[in-house]
Structures are given as C-alpha cells and as structure tokens.
Image: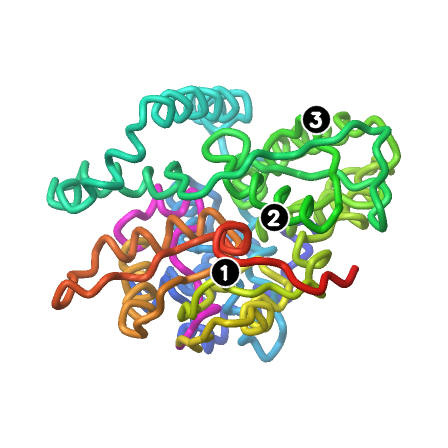
Amino acid sequence: MKKFQDYEEEIYKCSRCGLCQSVCPVYKATLNECAVSKGKFTILNGILKGDLAFTQKVKSYLDLCTGCNACKNFCPSDIDARDILIAAKNEFYKTCQVNFIYRIISSYFVFKKLLVCVGVFTFLYRLLGIDKLVNNLSFLFSRIPFLGRYILLYNSLVFSGHSKPSVFCSERDSYNNLKTAIFFEGCFNKYINPQTEDSVFKILSDAGIKLMKKNFECCGISFLSDGNFDEFKKIIAINLSKIDSDYNYILTDCASCNSVLKMYKDFSSDKRAADLSAKTISVLDLIHNFKFVANNDFKLAVHVPCHETFDLTNFVKNIANATFIDVEDSSACCGFSGTFAIKNSEISRKISKSKAQKYYDSGVDFVITTCPACVLGLEQGFLDIESKNNTARPKVINLFNFLAGYCSIKNIDL
C-alpha cells in the first residue's frame, strides 16, 4: 500500500471538488463538511503543506467515514478515498505522540482478550437459553430505554433459529473438485455464533464437498481500517503461520473478511501472503451454479455489503419459488461499519434507520446480506422504526443461513 505522502496529487484534487457529498452517507446524515472527502482532504492537504499537524482531533475527523467507498464509485477521477484515509491514519500513528494507554487499548492483544471474553459470555448466554427468552420477549425489551436496544442488538447476532451441526474433515479426506479447501471462519463464527459457519458446511456437505478448518485469528479489518498497520501485520503473520499444508482455496463466508485477506499481499513480503491473497474466494464463487429452491413463496430483498464483489443481487434473484423485491439503494451503506458505530453511534443510527425504513416500507419477508456487521446495522435501524399497524418488520438474515434453513438444493453443477 502507498504511503500517505504518495497521495499528494489525489489529495489536492479531491480537496478542490466536493461532488461526492451527494452520495456520502455520513455527510447526508450530518451535513458536516468535514464528513465528506473534500473536507477531510482539505485538512490533509494542509498537513502535506506543513500548515497543520496530525492530532487526535484530526484523527477524529478521519474516523468520520464508514469506508463504504461510495465516493470512489461516484468520483470522475476514480480517487480511492478509503485507501488514502487509511494511509493518513497510519501516518497519524507514526508521527503523533499517541499515549501509552491508547496504544495498549488499540492493540491486538487487548482485542483478542476482549473477543475471548465475549466468546465465553456468549457461550453461557446461549447455554442458559437467554437468547431464546429475549427473542420471545423482544416486545418488552424494546420498551426498555437505552439498555433494551443493545440487548436486542446483541441477541440478533447470538440467537440461532436453525443451527445445523458442522461436518469437518481431516487433511487426508478427498475434496472432490475443490481438492484442498480451507475455511476461514472469522471472528463472528468463532466467538459469537457459529450458525453461519454451520450453514456453509451444511450446504457444501449436501453438495458432497468437505472442507478443512484451521484455528485462524481475526482477519484484522478493524486494525487495517484504523491505519494501525503494526498490529495488522502481526495478525497477518499469525494467520499465515496457521497454514501448514498445501491448499487450493481459502473460502470465506463474509464479504469483509474476503476483501481483507486479498490485501495481505500488500502488507507482507512473505510468499504465503501472496498465495493466500490469490487463492481467497467467497463461498458464493463456489456455489453460484447451484440451484436453490425456497420452501415458501418468500418476498426477498438484498443488502449488498460495501466490501461485496460478488453479484449478490443476481444470486438472490435466481432463488426459485421466491419473489425478489428490488429495494432502492440496496447497495448503500448500512451505517454500522464496525468501530464507526462505536465512535459515532448517533450518526450510525441515523444512517441505519434511513436504510432500514426502505426495507420496512417494501413489505419484504427477508433482507439478505453476507456480512455480520451489516446484519447489526440493519437490525439497529429497525429498532428505531416505529411499527405501523402492527406490521411485521423484515427478518435480516445472512445469505447462507437462509439457504440452509429455508431452501433445498437442486441440480448441483460444480
């Protein structure tokens, strides 16, 4: 990845434009000039000229971005604002006197400990059946100010409606047309709810395909997005060390994980990083020729995650015995974007509500996506929407959970 200083020309160009404010979800939610690329790049241009310096305040402005890349897709000069902001945040870590406490809190060591704690808590939460209790009494929890919404948000990730047992294999098993495929489970499957992983293994098992599983760490997206390259490179090294055999594919079920793994080669000179980046594919790339038949005439809509490169809309359109509803702005950002929702919660909620309202008004049964953070974003939005005439709101669901729980497979063509 290029250094911050290497983007001088793009930063100057972008600071003179401002066209992308019409598509920036954060600007539309705040009308804050510093939220759009032009405002941020005006600050960065001042830093490059020596008129300004990186500070915590500057960093907070750079963090006013979901990383959705709507600005790049709209930009007549094809400037990648997301990459430039990541490089700028890395420069902040290198040049600003970041205090020791901040560095500890933002380290992978602390992040990993937090994930483990969340994993233990979630295991007990589900073991005691609290997820089912909260799901059945959701109408009561929705009336509890502040705390109730966060319990419901957490429960939306933890609750499993139709979990299926995973079928794993040893390295000596045959892998049919896949030969050797390794599944990258990601943080969500590993620490919070393995339902999506279970669904993927069920779908592939039904198709006669078996996968290997390694004990990978997080893909590192939060550190990459924050510009914390030192911690991101540590994660890359750990994940590369987990691969101790030859393989043909790394399979992912998450659009964000998929995009980050493909970037490993840009941050590591290890040959294994280039191999991993080249061999990473989505489960969707593998099952795109499968014929899925819904077990009911559901009305389906999609939310396309910002990092999704596969044609998710067309895939869902081809699910037989279901009706596809084309909802406006289905590929627009949901507003969650990981740590953005923590640092800028009010802005995140406003974006999510606007997005969720369109699905609510469309009358669909399911909103299908391929990113757990997007599930949270849409669920967050629905919590802020007042129900009209007791109309049931759509169910937000991961694609693979929908395929495993509500569909059958016909005419498999590998």
Alpha carbon separation for disc pair 3 and 2: 20 Å
Secondary-structure class at tag 2: loop
Residue ID at (41%, 65%)? 36
Alpha carbon separation for disc pair 1 and 3: 27 Å
**Amino acid under label 1?**
Cys
Say which residue label 3 marks: 238
Q: Residues within 10 Å of mark 2 (few under 14, many from 20)?
A: many
Kindly report the secondary structure that dominates the magenta region of the rendered protein: loop
The spot of residue 377 in percent (x, y) is 37, 53
Whichever of callouts 2 and 1 sits on the residue coming sooner in the sequence is 1
Q: Nearer the viewer, mark 3 or mark 2?
A: 2
**Within the magenta stretch, is there residue 312?**
no
Residue 13 sits in which quadrant? bottom right
Say which residue label 1 marks: 68
Say which residue label 2 marks: 253
Q: Is residue 333 above or below residue 2?
A: below
Specify start and end residues of the magenta stretch as a single range: 328-347
Q: Is residue 106 above or below residue 208?
A: above
**Amino acid under label 3?**
Ile
